[in-house]
Amino acid sequence: MITNSELKYIKKLGRKKYRNLYSHFVVEGEKVFQDFLNSNIPVFKSYSTKQINSESNTVVTDNCMKRMTFLKTPSNVLGIFSTPKKKTAPVNMKVLVLDNVSDPGNLGSIIRLCDWFGFENIVCSEKTVDCYNPKVIQSSMGSVARVNIFYEDLSSYLSRVKIPVYGTFLNGEPVHKVNFPNEFVLIFGNESNGISKSIIKFLSHKITIPKASKSVVDSLNITSATAIIMNEITNQSFKG
């Protein structure tokens, strides 16, 4: 059984200030839970509707799981994991930078794309949505456990970067004409406002995804743009 105090604690972890206060976050779903269990991120406590391979596990009823879940349809496993200790973001190596990305689903999908395309490090602005938000964890499908994610003041971080910095814009050099080096920084801006004016000065290249001449679409969703550009970068590495 789960106690009322445990239930309240889990629900508190839906809010960033409590995740920061307690250094814990919630993971739901058997596959996603297993991904985190296989990582070096320690599990604090887990709950499941059946016995699982976790020493800290408590078996609960379906009704209990409905009360603690953050999902519309409860899964059969919910875990509480300890937030990794803050580390300094790497400089002068291949990094994806996210400037004030606000939607949890977008961030989760981008983390998943980084996992797919081999971008091991993401540097987020301090106003980017928390990567341990339950919606981010869910939409990343466990990739948060495999990608290094850092939160930094971007102006301070980018001032230390000595490698090419590419930023995505509606107007820029077509991405398929750009020759990406082995080490670079790739920046995506906010879904509505793009890259902040305060960090444009750090860019060495502005790139874009060209559209068909007859297209009347004014922009692409950030996750679609990320996938297209990362695919182009990957194709170049295969050719090279």
Image: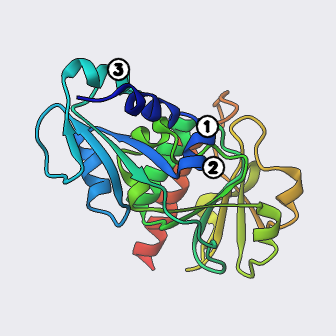
Task: Name the residue rendered at 47%, 58% in the picture.
Answer: 114
Residue behind mark 2: 209
The three-letter amino acid code for the residue at tag 2 is Ile
Report the disc number at residue 67.
3
Amino acid beneath label 3: Arg
Q: Nearer the viewer, mark 3 or mark 2?
A: 3
Task: Give the CA distance from mark 3 to mark 2.
Answer: 45 Å
Q: Residue furthest left?
A: 51
Q: Position of residue 219 (x, y in %)?
A: 67, 35
Which residue is at the front of the view, 142 or 22?
Answer: 22
- Give the colour scheme shown: rainbow
Q: Alpha-carbon neighbours of circle 3 within 10 Å: few (<14), some, or many (≥20)?
A: few
Residue 226 visible, this orientation? yes
Identify the image quadrant of residue 106: top right
**Front-lying residue, 52 or 155:** 52
Residue ID for mark 1 = 220
Binning the other alpha carbons within 10 Å of mark 2 as few (below 14), some (14 to 19) or many (20 upward) gives some
Q: Nearer the viewer, residue 179 or 81?
A: 81
Mark-to-mark CA distance, 1 and 3: 37 Å
In the displayed structure, 187 sits above or below 29; it is below
Image coordinates for residue 196, horizontal then vertical, percent = 82, 50
Contact, CB < 8 Å: mark 1 with mark 2? Answer: yes
Q: Secondary structure at mark 3?
A: helix
Identify the image quadrant of the C terminus.
Answer: bottom left
Q: Tell which circle, 3 or 2, labels the residue nearer the N-terminal end.
A: 3
**Residue drawn at the location 42% of the way across and 45% of the way down:** 140
The mark that comes first in sequence, 1 or 3, is 3
